[in-house]
Image (cartoon, grey):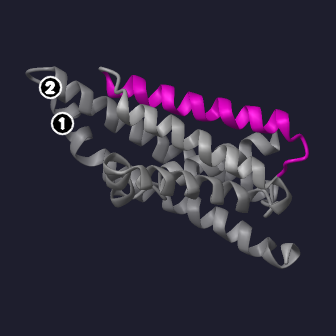
Amino acid sequence: MVALITLFLSHLIADFPLQTNYIYFLKKTSSWGILLHAAIHALVAFLLTGLRWDLWYVWLFLLGTHAIIDWAKLRYKSPKQWTGFLLDQLLHLLIMSIIVLWQPSLSSILPGWILYPAFVLAWIPAILMFLWVYASDVVRDHPNPSRTALWMRENLLQTSRLSGYPCLVLALSGLLSNLPILL
């Protein structure tokens, strides 16, 4: 379970605080942007699971599957963005579950007192991003959207980005505190 939480934490970090507007723009306009984003996912997972060079094929699998899922999501859009968002996250979780079953020795470099709070914090930008996507659908699809939906569409993207930084700092502090052990 620790390995799955660690991989999902790495996913949440790479998908939300580390996916800047610029990286998202690159993803939408170029396959290189998709590969860059997928490489960031693989790198964060590699770091948080303890720099396991011997599992290079796992990181390559993670990179490749992430790129394929994101490529498909960008090319075959669902009518409602929020359903595409949830399907995307579910597929990534499925891939991480397969990795954990495939590699039962996978673990976390983060001690539990950092891993679990970071995991909880990582959900905040994800939930805010989902609400932003949902509000964007509502504003697009309704002739007179509510003021709440308009406010959410205007404010939650930036709020989501900013809310991811505490989780990122916590994960980095855990990583850096264990770096001497790894080297």
To which residue does mark 2 refer?
145
* Residue 144 as seen in the image, left or right of residue 162: left
> Looking at the image, which is closer to me, 85 or 29?
29
Q: What residue do we see at 32% from left, 38% from top?
A: 132
Please say if 157 is above or below 130.
below
Say how many tags the image has: 2
Secondary structure at badge 1 equals: helix
Instruction: Classify residue 136 by image quadrant.
Output: top left
Mark 2 and 1 residues: CB-CB less than 8 Å, in contact?
Answer: yes
Task: Inspect the magenta stretch and tell me whether residue 114 lies in it.
Answer: no
First reached walking from the N terminus: tag 2 or tag 1: 2
Task: Inspect the magenta stretch and tell me whether residue 86 lies in it.
Answer: yes
Residue at the far left: name it: 143
Q: Three-letter amino acid code at disc 2?
A: Pro
> Picture coordinates of residue 143 (x, y %)?
8, 21
The magenta segment: 80-107
Please say if 177 is above or below 40.
below
As drawn, the label of residue 176 is none
Residue at the far right: name it: 105
Q: What residue do we see at 73% from left, 33% from top?
A: 97
> Looking at the image, which is closer to me, 28 or 48?
28
Check the picture and name the quadrant holding the C terminus.
bottom right
* Residue 8 as seen in the image, left or right of residue 58: left
Please say if 134 is above or below 19.
above
Q: Residues within 10 Å of mark 2 (few under 14, many from 20)?
A: some
* Residue 181 as seen in the image, left or right of residue 27: right
> Picture coordinates of residue 111 (x, y %)?
81, 59
Check the picture and name the quadrant holding the N terminus.
top right
Magenta span dominant secondary structure:
helix
Instruction: Classify residue 8 by image quadrant.
Output: top right
To which residue does mark 1 refer?
150
